[in-house]
Image (cartoon, rainbow, N blue to C red):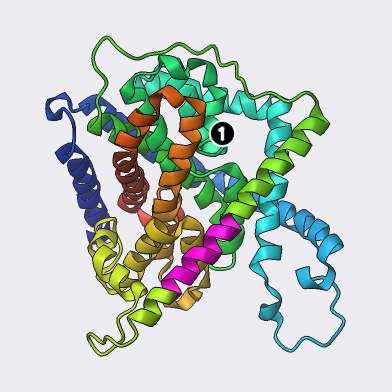
């Protein structure tokens, strides 16, 4: 029998879908079959990874792969930065946790995964995996070939890299299909960052790597559904054909590694710059708010975000006693990027947050839907299809709304499943 928290998540699922219907451009065109199908696909994917007998072997393999990548990356980082990156220390260390430096422990993973992803794409391994997911979305959700391929690519590539995969078809996409591509790009994360997130959460969340991987995958169907609700496809339009070939090509394996590393470097630099600036801005606002007190405590950005998003966190299945802290994490994700939210989630000691809440928040913050990504989306798509720049500008805030809710929908679906599936 479902408990109250499972029912709470089902209520949140209904509220999320209802919120998108309320801002729909055509409320009469609600995609009932797609709504049922999207939720079933999400639940099936989660159960496939966590609920099928023998799934522990798969989860252990995923965790082992992440640990192996982290270890290999650490060797390369220590070769360049020595003891600063955790290598042999030239002095006696009194505080071992202080050796963890985000710039040396987490960001280099993005470089390695980016290069590895490019190599796997050149070897057609990642291309065939993407094609498989593309066919899945095409057959189960009625997407056109180009849209299905872009959605599948978003699971593994970035929100700007994936449109490059279907660059030859961008001018053939309808307004609804462009919007869908934007929403799914904001609802998912790139493969280059998944390993970093899993590394951050590994010490405090069992099967963290599996949860992060599944979170990005299941948010794709959620993004498809919410995008179709807000801007439905006009009957008779859409369905641009794609032969699952791509403009994203490399000349050789070495070319893939070099270009993949260069792309990863740009991601690392962007993440570093955004984190420095946004964390500094929040600290600046907190300084300005330092003179105000409310409810026996100083008013801070963190407390305000907790108040605003606590009801949202409760709706996805978080107990009210933890909703304030969970709501704060949602606010951090929206304003300061999901990277900061994952860092803060990883910093919460295991005994100070229940495993269920930590798991739900992993799904809720695992997406690029934040204010900073609005600029990235507009800039990237304007370069790829300059003639549609105004269309992108007109839809980008709706896309942010849908992308943010898509990750919440994924968390609500997970929250509605029996805890026994995840061993909680």
Between 86 and 61, the one lying in front of the other is: 86
Q: Could you tell me which residue is drawn at 23 percent across and 85 percent down?
A: 294
Residue 399: quarter of image: top left
Residue at the (35%, 73%) spot, across then down: 301
Q: Position of residue 134 (x, y in %)?
A: 49, 23
**Residue 295 pos. (x, y %):** 22, 86
Residue at 39% x, 25% y: name it. 388
Residue 176 lies within the magenta run: no
Rendering coords of residue 201 (x, y %): 55, 62
Q: Is residue 112 left or right of residue 246?
A: right
Q: Please state the horizontal and vertical placement of residue 348, each as a whole percent of the image.
A: 48, 73
Q: Which residues are magenta?
A: 271-283
Q: Is residue 62 above or below residue 339?
A: above
Q: Is residue 288 above or below residue 6?
A: below
Q: Main secondary structure of the magenta part?
A: helix
Q: Can residue 364 be seen by looking at this rendering?
A: yes
Q: Which residue is most to the left?
A: 28
Q: Is residue 306 left or right of residue 333?
A: left
> What is the crowding at mark 1: few (fewer than 14 residues within 10 Å), some, or many (at least 20)?
some
Decide if residue 67 is on the left or right side of residue 224. Answer: right
Q: Quadrant of the C terminus?
A: bottom left
Q: Depth check: 236 or 96 in front?
A: 236
92 w.r.t. 349: above or below:
below
Q: Is residue 235 left or right of residue 340?
A: left
Residue tagged by mark 1?
A: 161
Please tell me in which quadrant of the rendered image residue 117 appears.
top right
Q: Is residue 45 visible?
A: no
Residue 276 on the magenta span: yes
């Amino acid at each position: 029998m479902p408990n109250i928290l499972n029912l709470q998540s089902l209520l949140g699922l209904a509220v999320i879908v209802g919120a998108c219907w309320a801002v729909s451009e055509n409320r009469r065109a609600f995609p009932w079959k797609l709504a049922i199908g999207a939720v079933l696909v999400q639940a099936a994917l989660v159960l496939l990874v966590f609920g099928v007998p023998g799934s522990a072997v798969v989860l252990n393999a995923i965790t082992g792969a992440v640990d192996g990548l982290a270890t290999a990356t650490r060797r390369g980082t220590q070769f360049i930065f020595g003891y600063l990156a955790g290598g042999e220390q030239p002095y006696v260390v009194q505080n071992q946790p202080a050796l963890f430096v985000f710039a040396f422990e987490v960001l280099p993973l993005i470089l390695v995964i980016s290069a590895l992803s490019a190599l796997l794409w050149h070897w057609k391994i990642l291309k065939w995996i993407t094609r498989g997911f593309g066919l899945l979305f095409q057959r189960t959700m009625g997407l056109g070939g180009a849209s299905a391929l872009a959605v599948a690519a978003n699971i593994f590539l970035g929100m700007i890299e994936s449109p490059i995969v279907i660059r030859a078809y961008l001018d053939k996409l309808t307004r609804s299909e462009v919007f869908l591509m934007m929403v799914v790009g904001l609802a998912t994360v790139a493969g280059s960052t998944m390993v970093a997130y899993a590394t951050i959460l590994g010490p405090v969340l069992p099967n963290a790597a599996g949860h992060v991987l599944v979170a990005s995958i299941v948010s794709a169907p959620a993004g498809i559904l919410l995008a179709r609700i807000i801007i439905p496809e006009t009957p008779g339009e859409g369905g641009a054909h794609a032969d699952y070939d791509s403009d994203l090509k490399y000349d050789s394996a070495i070319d893939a590694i070099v270009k993949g590393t260069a792309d990863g470097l740009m991601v690392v630099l962007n993440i570093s710059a955004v984190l420095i600036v946004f964390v500094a801005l929040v600290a600046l606002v907190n300084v300005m708010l330092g003179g105000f007190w409310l409810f026996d405590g100083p008013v801070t950005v963190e407390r305000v975000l907790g108040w605003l998003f606590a009801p949202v966190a409760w709706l996805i299945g978080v107990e009210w006693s933890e909703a304030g802290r969970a709501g704060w994490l949602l606010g951090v994700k929206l304003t300061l990027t999901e990277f900061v939210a994952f860092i803060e989630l990883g910093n919460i000691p295991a005994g100070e947050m229940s495993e269920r809440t930590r798991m739900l928040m992993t799904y809720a913050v695992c997406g690029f839907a934040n204010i900073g990504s609005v600029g990235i989306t507009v800039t990237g798509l304007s370069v790829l299809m300059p003639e549609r720049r105004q269309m992108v500008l007109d839809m980008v805030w709706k896309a942010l709304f849908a992308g943010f809710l898509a990750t919440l929908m994924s968390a609500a679906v997970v929250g509605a499943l029996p805890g026994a599936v995840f061993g909680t």
